[in-house]
Amino acid sequence: MRKVPHRIYLSEEQMPTQWYNLRADMKDLPDPMINPATGKPAIEEDLYPVFCKELARQEMDNTTRYVPIPEEVLEFYRMYRPSPLIRAYNLEKSLDTPAKIYYKFEGNNTSGSHKLNSAVAQAYYAKEQNLKGVTTETGAGQWGTALAEACSFFHLPLTVYMVKCSYEQKPFRKSVIQTFDADIIPSPSNTTQVGRKILEENPDTTGSLGCAISEAVEKAVTTDGYKYVLGSVLNQVLLHQSIIGEESLLAMQMIDEYPDVIVGCAGGGSNLGGLIAPFMRDKLTGKANPRIVAVEPASCPSMTRGKYAYDFCDTGKVTPMARMYTLGCDFIPSANHAGGLRYHGMSPILSKLYHDGYMEAVSAEQTKIFETAVQFAKQETILPAPESAHAIYGAVQEAIKCRESGEAKTILFGLTGTGYFDMVAYQSYMEHTMADYIPSDEELEASFAKLPKIPGIQ
């Protein structure tokens, strides 16, 4: 008989009311961002031209352990949170594993992903600052959709620059974003100087998150009353997403469980950082020692094959430089890369933790990812987003290890969202037209050669 319910729900009253700042417990902090104009470490005021003041403060705050969630944000959260922790009984059975597999499902909202957790916070702070509007980028479309929802709720105009190949592959993302009154532009575009420059150099480019970030930042800083917001990578985003991990920890405590292994998909770091936050806190403070595994696409392998170096966060080289695992800001993933997880770098927080040995990273080809996604859908009845399927793949591999060793480990992974806007990719997999592209060492070395030179560092 099942001793644990299939779905474990917290009540509204049990939902966390604070975000957790992982940096407050890190023994060694990430290296500071570098202002490209001065060559010196960036300070909070350097971020004001681009970000809301409160978000700039959160970005640079390394010491405040817990940040109260504003009541207006909590009220919005209560429309779709707490999200369920689910025991994957059918998946366990199909794998014939003694492992117990749990997943935190973040797809119970219109955006279909975890991105709404930070989108509502950033839209709220923008509205509090009386901004006229905001700009952003989106890769697969989850962030753009989530921010459109949040900005619509707070009556805040939004312009979204969407990576061109994703824009073409996912036309219905455009429709949903427009439903919430946001403007959406395929990137690179002719609407910005940096977009025109990129197109002039490479007219057939399929775009990248780095390109889209450059355009969104330029649009923000050249439009009166506008600021830029970002859906991943930044410290502030990982702060907001910590509610995923905090809820996961509370739900597991309700059933007297604690994960031996935590698995998350890795693109820029928002979901992974949010999911692991309280468990990494336990690891850093010596309370527990779970294994933490990041799974990234073989076509965009920033952690497993990237360099730990200072790099620009955008292709146009207008943002501060961050020390992170990077493939180079000019790196553009293959156009047949399905879904998100296409950013050239990794969150500085996660990069530092990985560099210092607190977590592991693996990569996988996308045909393997979609094979696992289909297997999961058949067993658990949720069609996962391609991004989420990377975490599923990692969890399945860990469960297979348990089957082979006989160890009954507890595995937790993050199901970041649903894949109902990714049917072109699923169709490509089903029709056997999906290809696995892995960048060569020569391609990566050419990109690394363009990394910025920082005197005294690199």
Image (tube, grey):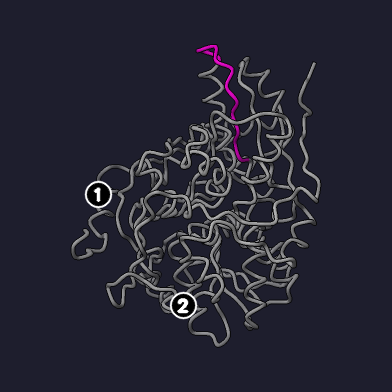
**CA–CA distance between discs 1 and 2?**
29 Å
Magenta segment boundaries in residue numbering: 403-414
Dot 1 amino acid type: Glu
Which is nearer the N-term, disc 1 or disc 2? 2
Answer above or below: position of 28 versus 374: below
> Percent x, y for residue 316?
38, 70
Element assignment for label 2: helix
Question: Label for residue 445?
Answer: 1
- Closest to the observer: 370 or 430? 370
Residue that extends furthest to the left in the rendered view of this protein: 456
Which corner quadrant of the image does residue 140 belong to?
bottom right
- Closest to the observer: 193 or 213? 213
Q: What residue lies at 48% left-to-right and 36% top-to-bottom?
A: 293
**Is residue 45 rendered magenta in the image?**
no
The residue labelled by disc 2 is 218
Answer above or below: position of 79 versus 1: below
Crowd band around label 1 with a 10 angstrom C-alpha radius: few (<14), some (14–19), many (20+): some
> Percent x, y for residue 298?
42, 40
> Percent x, y for residue 348?
41, 55
Dot 2 amino acid type: Glu
